[in-house]
Amino acid sequence: MAVDFENSIPIYLQVVEQLKSDIISGKFSAGERLPSVRDLALQLKVNPNTVQKAFTELEDMGLVFTERTNGKFVTEDIALIAKHKQEHADIITQKYMKTMEKIGFDKSEVIFLINNLGGNR
Amino acid sequence: MAVDFENSIPIYLQVVEQLKSDIISGKFSAGERLPSVRDLALQLKVNPNTVQKAFTELEDMGLVFTERTNGKFVTEDIALIAKHKQEHADIITQKYMKTMEKIGFDKSEVIFLINNLGGNR
DNA sequence: CTCAATGTATTACTGACTTAATACAACAAT
DNA sequence: ATTGTTGTATTAAGTCAGTAATACATTGAG
C-alpha cells in the first residue's frame, strides 16, 4: 500500500479508498485487526492524524470499529461489507458509464473496450 | 452546464472537464466558436480568471485556439479531437477496471453490471 | 505501579484555489 | 476616431482543506 503525494486527491481519502477496497475485497477479513494508526502512518510516511482521519471515515461507514486501547478492527457484519461492496461497484459503474456516454460511447462500445483491455499489454 | 461548488474538485478543472467532454463528444463542432470568457464566467457565476484558467488548459492540450479579439474556438484538427477522445476513453476505462478488479470483480462480472444498468431506473 | 501501546484532541501552519479589482491590448464595426 | 467586444496580465487578498506537531487519555502487560 502506498499513497501518491503528487496526486491532487487528498492523502486521507486515498487511505480511505485503499482500506475500503481491502475490506470490501476481503483482503482484510471481517473481525480482523487493522494496522494501528501509528504503524500505518509510519509505513505510508504520513502524519498519524491523516491516518486517523481516514479511519474516522471508515468508522462512520460502519466498516471499522475501535477498541479504545487495543486497536481498530474490521466490522464483523459481513452483510454490511457485502452491501458496501455492491453499492461501491454500482456507484463507480454508473459514474463511469455516465462519463463514457457523455463523450459519445454507448454500452456496446464500452463493453467492446473493456473486452479488449488486456490485448495490448 | 453548471459547476458544483460543494465538490472538492477545483472549479476550473470541472470547467475543463465539461468543455473537453463537449468538444470530444462533438457537442461543440470543430472550428466552432466557444462562449467568451466573460460570458461563461457570468453564466457559471464564477470569476473570469477561473474560466480563463480552464481555457488555458484546453489550449495547452491543443483542443482550443484563440483569435485575439474575436474569441476562442474549437480546434479544426479533427484527428486531434479523435485522438483525445480515444485516449480519454482508454484512460478512464483502464482506471475503472483496475478499481473494479481491486474490489473483487472480474471482467465478466463488470460487463454484467454494465448490461444491467438501465434496469432499475 | 509503571510502562508501552493504543486511540484522541487541540492547535497551528501551509499552500492551492478562488476571488477580486484593475489595467492593458487588439481589432471589428460604426 | 470612437466604441464595444474580445482576450490577457498583474497584484493582492481571503478561504479552506489538508497536514503536521504535540500533548492528553485509556488500558493491558509486566
Image: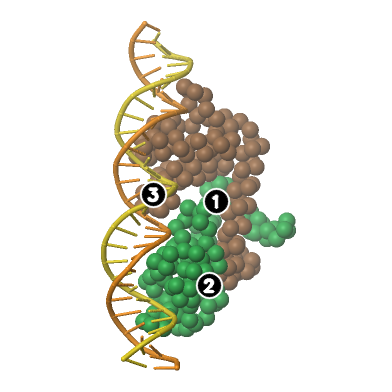
Chain colours: A brown, B green, C orange, D yellow
Q: Nearer the viewer, mark 2 or mark 3?
A: 2
The quarter in which the N terminus of chain A is drawn is: top left
Label 1 residue SS? helix
Residue A114 in the figure: left or right of residue C26: right
For the residue marked with disc 3, what is the amino acid?
Answer: Asp
The residue singled out by tag 2 in the image is: B22
Label 2 residue SS? helix
Marks 3/1: CA–CA distance: 20 Å
**Whole-percent x and y of residue B70?**
41, 83
Q: Quick check: can you spot residue A116?
A: no
Q: Residue at x 66, y 37 (%)?
A: A79
**Whole-percent x and y of residue A70?**
48, 23
**Whole-percent x and y of residue D13?**
33, 54
2 and 1 marks on the same chain = yes
Return the disc, 2 or 1, that comes first in the chain's sequence. Answer: 2
Marks 2/3: CA–CA distance: 30 Å
Q: Residue at x 54, y 51 (%)?
A: B101
Q: Residue at x 51, y 66 (%)?
A: B44
Label 3 residue SS? loop
The residue singled out by tag 3 in the image is: A4
